[in-house]
Image (cartoon, rainbow, N blue to C red):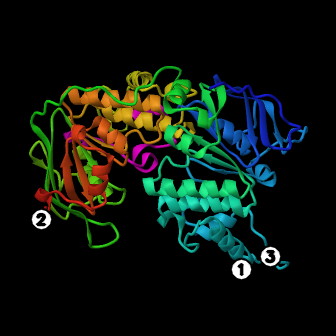
């Protein structure tokens, strides 16, 4: 595998975009350092890097969100650099971007979001809705991006919202498409569908930049891959000439292990006990969790594995207090939780890494320092006589930043909104683990993290287990479950379908139980 030195290719008609000597500085932070990237026409070019490597910043420059501190951008083989003052300028040049955190107006319909900022009107000033709708419907048919145009985006699934973002780009006739961590919040089925759509776009002649830190996805979808590390370009490679070990080592700068060593579990007392737990779906009277029973003990990691939408969210809400329990019981150290407030559950010793970091994990307009002490605000270490003890709060935050390798421009004073999704996730994981609660509910704990960060978080979680914590892991990632869990429970339509030793099972067997094709005898009985 030889590294490709990126030279100026501005005269080459096969080039869609060339970003030459791009540098971007935010105060003391050099986010991009003299980067050269070439996107060829009709290719999928992956930009790979760890959290905070500068991937999103670089693509935001191309998308018109940020001006570069220095450097130039060339389009379509021209020798004349373009200036992008804002995203509208990028749109005029045929550049569109699907952001990691979607740029949609929740109270607008899919149709309204797609045409927003790109409306056409007749001489009397009325919108040409029929013309716009016909164009959108044609795009939906061409690319397989079918959505309900009349539905408000706040009522859409994440996968549907992403389709709205894609249709926004295509409606504006974008030829250069940027996908910023497009699979970070998607289910396995949605990821598979997105990959088909991206290939279809390439086959239609679009040029695509695909930002990711997921090695398997990069190797599956891309023609070439450029790797960033701490703001610098490491190299550009033909994807077919790489493997996961090579890419991971280039990303992180060291060997990365894809499995975490751990000793056998030594379970102690029961910490969380669920007995015949029933929870209704939020939009109907049907049961999302159907007579579910399991125990989580000190010093063990129990995992619930299933396809997204099979009761996991409702189960989490029942345990944390975000949702109501219909019947059955949930006990922490023998104390019933069903009537306890969220605050009481927190104080009783429940730490929670939520699946949605923006809705339930962070206050985005607070800095890291205040986000790390959200649930500890009344702890005497952080407050005294009603006043915050800023020195102690900062010390706690600094410890989390160092231990969890959180990349930020202003240390503990960095607004979490300004950080990459992966670094936001590290703030939540660090805060919840360092609260030192006896029970940790970890839902998709490594969502949005790169391979190096995943390796680190997995080691920390296993370390917490070895200290005697009881951990309930709910994840959609089979690899993660096999790597961390001491016992795996599969779930389908709110019911447990099987119990497995991760050392004695595999993808194929687990797949049968998470799809409901098989159920172990002990879970077939009515009421289980």
332 to the left or right of 106: left
In the rendered image, which residue does mark 3 sit on? 125
Residue 357 percent coordinates (x, y):
43, 45
> Upstream in the sequence, badge 1 or badge 2?
1
388 to the left or right of 262: right
Front-lying residue, 510 or 387: 510
Residue 434 percent coordinates (x, y):
32, 29
Q: What whole-number distance in Å separates the C-alpha atoms at marks 1 and 3?
A: 14 Å
CB contact under 8 Å: marks 1 and 2: no
Q: Which residue is located at x 26 percent, y 29 percent?
A: 464
In the rendered image, which residue does mark 2 sit on? 527
| Residue 251 in view | yes
Residue 342 percent coordinates (x, y):
27, 49
Front-lying residue, 344 or 352: 352
Instruction: Specify start and end residues of the magenta stretch as a single range.
Output: 346-372
In the rendered image, which residue does mark 1 sit on? 130
Q: Which residue is located at x 43 percent, y 34 percent?
A: 427
Front-lying residue, 78 or 353: 78
Is residue 360 located in the magenta-colored stretch of the structure?
Answer: yes
């Amino acid at each position: 595998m030889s590294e490709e030195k990126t030279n100026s290719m501005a005269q080459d008609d096969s080039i869609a975009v060339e970003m030459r000597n791009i540098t971007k500085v935010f105060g003391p932070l050099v986010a991009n350092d003299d980067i050269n990237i070439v996107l060829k026409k009709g290719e999928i070019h992956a930009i790979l890097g760890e959290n905070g490597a500068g991937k999103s910043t670089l693509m935001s420059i191309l998308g018109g969100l940020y001006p570069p501190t220095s450097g130039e951008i060339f389009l379509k083989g021209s020798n004349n650099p373009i200036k992008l003052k804002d995203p509208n300028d990028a749109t005029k040049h045929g550049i569109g971007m699907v952001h990691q955190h979607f740029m949609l107006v929740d109270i607008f319909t899919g149709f309204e979001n797609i045409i927003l900022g790109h409306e056409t009107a007749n001489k009397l000033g009325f919108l040409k809705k029929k013309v716009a709708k016909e164009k959108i419907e044609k795009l939906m048919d061409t690319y397989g991006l079918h959505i309900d145009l009349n539905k408000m985006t706040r009522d859409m699934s994440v996968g549907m919202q992403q389709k709205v973002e894609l249709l926004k780009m295509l409606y504006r006739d974008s030829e250069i498409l940027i996908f910023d961590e497009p699979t970070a919040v998607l289910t396995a089925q949605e990821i598979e569908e997105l990959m088909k759509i991206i290939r279809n776009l390439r086959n239609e002649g679009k040029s695509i930049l695909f930002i990711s830190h997921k090695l398997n996805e990069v190797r599956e979808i891309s023609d070439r891959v450029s790797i960033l590390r701490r703001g610098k370009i490491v190299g550009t490679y033909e994807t077919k000439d790489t493997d996961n070990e090579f890419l991971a080592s280039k990303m992180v700068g060291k060997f990365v292990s894809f499995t975490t060593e751990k000793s056998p579990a030594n379970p102690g007392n029961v910490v969380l006990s669920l007995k015949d737990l029933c929870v209704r779906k939020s939009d109907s009277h049907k049961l999302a969790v159907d007579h579910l029973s399991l125990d989580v003990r000190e010093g063990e990691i129990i995992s619930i594995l299933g396809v997204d939408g099979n009761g996991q969210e409702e189960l989490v809400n029942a345990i944390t207090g975000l949702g109501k329990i219909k019947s059955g019981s949930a006990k922490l150290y023998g104390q019933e939780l069903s009537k306890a407030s969220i605050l009481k559950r927190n104080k009783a010793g429940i730490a929670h890494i939520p699946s949605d970091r923006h809705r339930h994990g962070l206050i985005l307009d607070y800095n890291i320092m205040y986000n790390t002490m959200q649930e500890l605000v009344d702890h005497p270490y952080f407050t005294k006589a009603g006043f915050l003890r800023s020195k102690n709060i900062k010390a706690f935050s600094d410890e989390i930043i160092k231990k969890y390798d959180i990349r930020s421009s202003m240390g503990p004073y960095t607004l979490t909104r300004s950080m990459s999704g992966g670094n936001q996730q590290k703030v939540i994981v660090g805060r919840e683990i360092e609260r030192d609660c006896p029970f940790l509910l970890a839902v998709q704990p490594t969502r949005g993290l790169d391979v190096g960060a995943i390796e680190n978080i997995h080691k920390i979680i296993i370390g917490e287990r070895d200290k005697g914590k009881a951990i309930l892991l709910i994840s959609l990632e089979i690899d993660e479950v096999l790597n961390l869990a001491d016992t795996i429970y599969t779930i389908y339509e709110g019911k447990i379908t099987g119990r497995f030793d991760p050392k004695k099972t595999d993808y194929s067997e687990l797949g049968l139980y998470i799809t409901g094709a098989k159920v172990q005898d002990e879970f077939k009985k009515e009421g289980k």
